[in-house]
Amino acid sequence: MKEALQKLTFRKPRQIIRPAIWIFFEDFFSLFPAIIIYVAINMLTAAFEDAGAINLKMLWIISSVLLALALAQFAIGYNAYKKMAPSIAEHIAEDRIDYVKKLRRLPLGFFARKEPGELINNFVNDFINIQQAMMGYLSGLFSVVLSCILTSIFMFIYNPIMAAAFYIALPVTVILVLLSIKTLERNSVIVARARDLSATNLNEYLRGMKTLKSYNQTGEGFKKLKDAYHHLMECYIKEEGGSGSLLRLCTSIVQFGIPLLCIAGGYMLLGGRLRAVDFIAIIIIGTKILTPVVTAISNMMILRINYTSAKRLDTTMSEREMPGQERSGDDTVVSFRNVSFAYAEGGELALKNASFTIPRGKLTAIVGPSGSGKSTILRLVARFWDVRDGEIMCGDGALSRLDPESWQENISMVLQDVYLFHETIRENILFGCRDANEEEMTWAAQKAGCHDFIMALPEGYDTIVGEGGSTLSGGERQRISIARAFLKKAPILLLDEPTASLDAKNEVLVQRAVGELVKDTTVVMIAHRLKTIQNADQILVLDKGEIIEQGVHEQLMKRNGLYAKLWVAQQKSMDWNIQPTKGD
C-alpha cells in the first residue's frame, strides 16, 4: 500500500494531505443533517406520545441549524475544490517538468527501446490518470474511509446488532475486490499497451503521409492504423466489462446491507427492544453511509487501474541516468582508447576496438561505406551514449565523469537531416544561444548566408516555419542550423556532411557557410564526398566498425587501400549519366 501511494503521487505523498483533509470535512459535514433530522423526529415523536405541544421554537432552531449546515457544507466543498484543483494542477505541472528533465538525462538507448506511442501516452494519458487519482479518487478514498469509520463507531455504540447486520455483507465485497485486483491490473496493462500501439501507428501514419501518397498506399497504411484502433476498442470493452460488472456486483452486495438492517431492526422493534424513532434514525444513518461506502469501493477499483499509469511513469523515473557530475574544462581534446560499442546489449558491434585522438582546433574527417560506424563516432563524441568497453577521454579525465549537459555545451552539430521547431526563424536561430541579442543573431545569420533570404520573407525573422521546417527548402534549413552553430560558438563542431543532399546552388552556399564556421574550431566531419576533405588534418577510414586506415589525403592515396578505392570510384561516378533508351 505504501509503495502504491508513493507511485500514485509521483513519490510526493504529501501532495494529497490537504485535499484529503478538505474532502474529509466535506463528507463529515454531510452526515450531520441526518443526526439533526433524528433529533427533530425524536422531538416530534415525544410530543405525539405524551400528547404535549410541539416545541415550534426548537423546530425553528433545528431548521436554522440544517440551513447553516447546508451553507457550511457548500462553503467547505467550494473551498476544498478551490484550494485542491490549483494545487493538484500545479503539482502535476511540476511532475511533468521533472519527467521531461529526467528524459533529458537518459541515454539514447532508452529511446531506442521505447515506442514513440508509449512516450506520448506517458506524458499525456498517464499523467491525466495520475491527476485524476490525486484530484478525487485517492484523497477522496482516505476521507471517505475515515468518515465511514467514525460513523460506524457511532452506529455500533448506538445499536451494535443493527450495525452488524448492515456491515455483514461488506467483508464479502472487500474479498471480491482484493481477489480481482490482479485481473484489473492485467486488463489495464493490456489497454495501456494497445493505446501505445495506436499512438505509434498514428504517429507513423502522419509522418509517412508523403510516402504513402507517393506510392498510392494511403489505404493500406490506414488499414494498419484501423486495426490498431479496433484492437484498442476490444481491449477497452474487455476492461470496462470486467471492472464495470465487478463494480455493480460489489455495489449490489453492499446495498444488501439496507434490507438486512431493516430486518434486524424490525425484529427488535416487534420485540420491544427498539423504539420506532430509533429504528428510523438508524435507517437514515445507514442510507447516508451507503453512498460513501460504494464510493470507496469504486475509488479502490479505479485506483488499481490508475496504478498501471503510476508504475509506467515510475519505471521511467527510476531509469539509470547518464553518470557524471564534473563540469567540463577548457581541455576539449577527445581520445578514444580501445572503444567497442553496440547499440543493444549483446548486439552486433557498431564500433570495434577504436583508438584515435581528435586534436584541438583541427579537422578530423571520417569516411567509409554505409554502416561502417561513422555516425556512431559522432554520437559517442556528443555523448548521446556511454561506452561499456574501452574509454573515451576528454583531456586527462574520462568523458563519463563529466556532467552530460555540461559537456554538450561544448558541442555544436550540423547534420543532413535538420529539424526546425514550429516557431519563428528568430526563435530557431536563438536556440543556439538564448541570451544572444538582436545584433549577435543577425551576425550569425549573415555568417551562415541566410540573412538575405530571411529578410525577403514577408515577416522576416518573425516568419513562422512549419513543423520540422517544412515551409523552407533543404538549403534554407541547413543555413539556419549553421546560424545556430555560429551563435553557440562551441569549441567542438560535429558535421554529418550537410551538403550531401542539396542542389548545386545550395551546396556552394552551405559549403561557404561551413567554411566560415570551422575556423579556429575542433571539427569532426563525416564525409560522403571525399573532395570536401582533401585538406583535412586527419582522415579516419572505417569499414565494418573498425578503423582500417588513418592519415591525410596524400598518405592514404599512396597506400592504395579502401580510401583510394572510394576516391577513384567517386571520380568515375562524376562522369556518369543516364542514357535514354533508343526505340526500335
Image (spheres, rainbow, N blue to C red):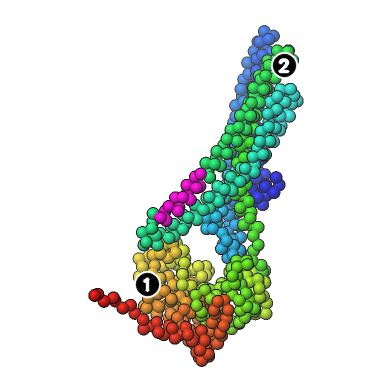
> Which residue is at the front of the view, 233 or 266?
233
| Mark 1, other Cα within 10 Å: few <14 / some 14–19 / many ≥20 | few
Residue range highlighted in magenta: 220-234
Q: Would you identify the image quadrant in which residue 298 lies?
A: top right
Which residue does the image show at 37% across and 75% down from the upper left? 503
Check disc 2 and give the amino acid type: Met
> Which residue is at the front of the view, 503 or 387?
387
Closest to the camera, between mark 2 and mark 1, is 2
> Which residue is at the front of the view, 329 or 163?
163
Q: Would you identify the image quadrant in which residue 276 lies?
A: top right
Question: Which residue is identified by label 1?
Answer: 453
- Residue 229 belongs to the span the image colors magenta: yes
| Mark 2, other Cα within 10 Å: few <14 / some 14–19 / many ≥20 | some
Q: Residue furthest top?
A: 51
Which residue does the image show at 67% across and 22% down from the upper left? 261
Check disc 1 and give the amino acid type: Phe
The disc at residue 268 is 2
